[in-house]
Amino acid sequence: MSLTLPPVDRDALVATRRDLHQHPELGFQETRTSTLVAERLQSLGYQVKTGVGQTGVVAVKRVGGGGSGGGQGKCVMLRADMDALPVEEANELPYKSTHPGRMHACGHDGHVAIGLEVARRLASLSLPGAVKFAFQPAEEISNGAQAMIRDGVLDAPKVDAAFGIHLWNDLPVGTIGIMPGPVMASVDEFEITILGRGGHAAAPHQTIDPVLIAAHVVTGLQSLVSRRRNPFEEGVVSVTQVSAGHAFNVIPGRADLRGTVRTFGGKFFEEAQRLVEEAAQGIAGAFGASAEVRYRRLSGPMANDEKMTALMKDVGEEIVGKERVIGGVRTMGGEDMSYFLRQVPGCFAFVGSAPPGKKASPHHSPTFDIDEDALPIGAELLARTAVRYLEQAQ
């Protein structure tokens, strides 16, 4: 890397992250966050556009027009997601969430802080191309990336490669997880309504009990993984919500189930909707009831480009050492970064954020927190990767 990056300002990184942690905002409600982001980027001299994908912010640093097609070098996009979760924080910290029922329980506060620090470090450099920052809303509900794409985030200048990171409590701080190919799963959502016939709890023979049927449907859906999926293909089917009835002595006429299917693609991904529908409707029909199934694909599997992964891996090894860059790190969790990587080559890496030698609270838990020593590593990884890509793309 011929360009010299300014050093990371760790104190500013931590301060920004803690400020955002105290003021979490849910998907498509990130007004305070996006205002803070836009003001910081404007002060650094970036061309800033707000309201991209409702509450997203896009900032561009151009060189002679930037972007492919203009003969002025490539354009690299760096993405940071901004939204929090509807979780009540249980941590007792100086920077605890000040908003009841909302919490940064997945590290997105750190992602935004890292993105702003990378923008600060790149602002003064004479880059051989264009860099674009996408501060994205609504990752947790899998809608934000698509909304930004519809609003043209990958255009003007046209994006040639995209990179992102996730602070990751399954890895200790000081490590980076990175590999080519599928690294995060598809996210499908299903809702099933079982319609039976209600009646007195003392006379079940006069009813068609949707609660009993729901129990059989849950068991049947689990058999999709154990008996209908090729064991060489990864897959998860989880029923996460079941609701029915309002009184202990009344068999209700309806039961509702909700859940998710996760895969890394393949035949099970292609057949999942049909299998869920057949299982629910077939089981309900066998009991004389009916089942309505609503199935939505929220995001596909997220796959890293082999060449872009090799570039980011080399950078990671320079930062933390070859032995601390770990391959094979994958998760059945989903990421709508997949929509960006479906259209342009890129890579998404996991930056270890668990305290060394300790088991950290899992993502989405009310006690989630990160080791803030991970923040400078994330800022180094994204900044150096962007510069390396643009230098090599000349």
Image: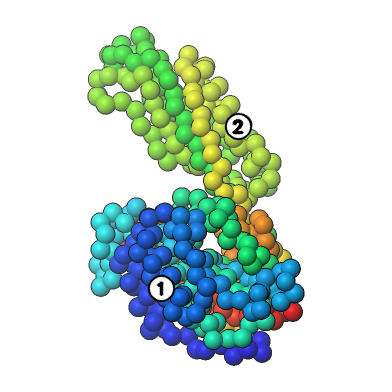
**Residue 39: which disc?**
1
Q: Which mark's residue is nearer the viewer, 2 or 1?
A: 1
- Pointer 2 and pointer 1: residues touching (CB < 8 Å)? no
Mark 1, residues whose alpha carbon is within 10 Å: few (<14), some, or many (≥20)?
few
Image quadrant in which the C terminus is located: bottom right
Most foreground residue, 336 or 317: 336
Q: Residue at x 66, y 79 (%)?
A: 64
Instruction: Indicate the colouring scheme.
Output: rainbow
Disc 1 marks a residue whose amino acid type is: Glu
> What residue do we see at 37% from left, 61% from top?
31
Would you identify the image quadrant in which residue 268 lies?
Answer: top right
Rendered location of residue 77, percent (x, y): 60, 69
Q: Nearer the viewer, residue 379 or 208?
A: 379
Vertical side of 142 occupied by 111: above or below: below
Tell me which residue sits at (38%, 70%) in the image.
Answer: 36
Horizontally, is 92 left or right of 77 in the view? left
Query: CA separation, marks 2 and 1?
Result: 49 Å
What mark, if any, has residue 275 been given in the picture? 2
Camera sees residue 388: no
Residue 202: x %, y % from top left: 27, 14
